[in-house]
Image (cartoon, helix red, strand yellow):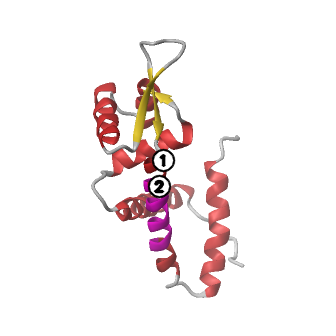
Amino acid sequence: MIAAVEVDRAEVAAQLRLVVTRLSRQLRQQSSGDLSPTVVSALFTVRRHGPLTLGELAAREQVSPPTITKMVARLEGLDLVTRTIDTEDRRVCRVEVTRLGAKELDRIRRRRTAWLTTRLRRLEPSELAQLSQAVELLERLTEDRP
């Protein structure tokens, strides 16, 4: 058990931000293939929240509508997503992940997990246990409750 000591929350926040950013960047690099991290992110978002309109996807990805249109066209050209006309408003199209897109996302997720698993082998069992506890704390930080 780590002894409770007086810590500077701002310093911990700064260190945590840096390490999470670095780890996230390294994990994104494990995707390999022809898809940029931004396009992979959009694909994951469609899978998680889809079917989405282009506007909804642009808002979730925090990019402009022209940017999301180009991304979706690229994904559609690779048969990773499909666009379908909304049945209630024919001016609107919705984007969904295809079977091939789902397989690609699963491949990316497996590759990232394997990379991280390899890194975790460097840790001693006691360090791995500490990290496991830290993961629980990180999960609490991401919860939306006050």
How far is disc 2 from disc 1 in space, using C-alphas? 6 Å
Towards the viewer: 109 or 143: 109
The majority secondary structure of the magenta stretch comes to helix
| Callout 2–callout 1 Cβ contact below 8 Å | yes
Residue 91's x, y, as percent?
42, 12
Towards the viewer: 117 or 91: 91
Towards the viewer: 52 or 64: 52
Which residue corresponds to mark 1? 99
Residue pictured at 45% horizontal, 61% vertical: 107
> Which amino acid, by three-letter code, is at mark 1?
Arg
Residue 129's x, y, as percent?
66, 78
Describe the element under mark 2 as helix, strand or loop: helix
Q: Is residue 5 visible?
A: no
> Which amino acid, by three-letter code, is at mark 2?
Lys
Q: Is residue 71 visible?
A: yes
- Give the extent of the magenta segment: 104-115
Residue 113's x, y, as percent?
50, 68
Residue pictured at 72% horizontal, 79% vertical: 1
Residue 71's x, y, as percent?
31, 37
Which residue corresponds to mark 2? 103
Towards the viewer: 132 or 78: 78
Q: Quadrant of the C terminus?
A: top right
Residue pictured at 57% horizontal, 57% vertical: 9
Where on the picture, by quarter, is residue 30? bottom left
Residue 129's disc number: none
Q: Establish if 53 lies above or below 141.
A: above
Residue pictured at 47% horizontal, 46% vertical: 44
Density class for disc 1 (Cα within 10 Å; few <14, some 14-19, many ≥20) is few
Describe the element under mark 1 as helix, strand or loop: helix
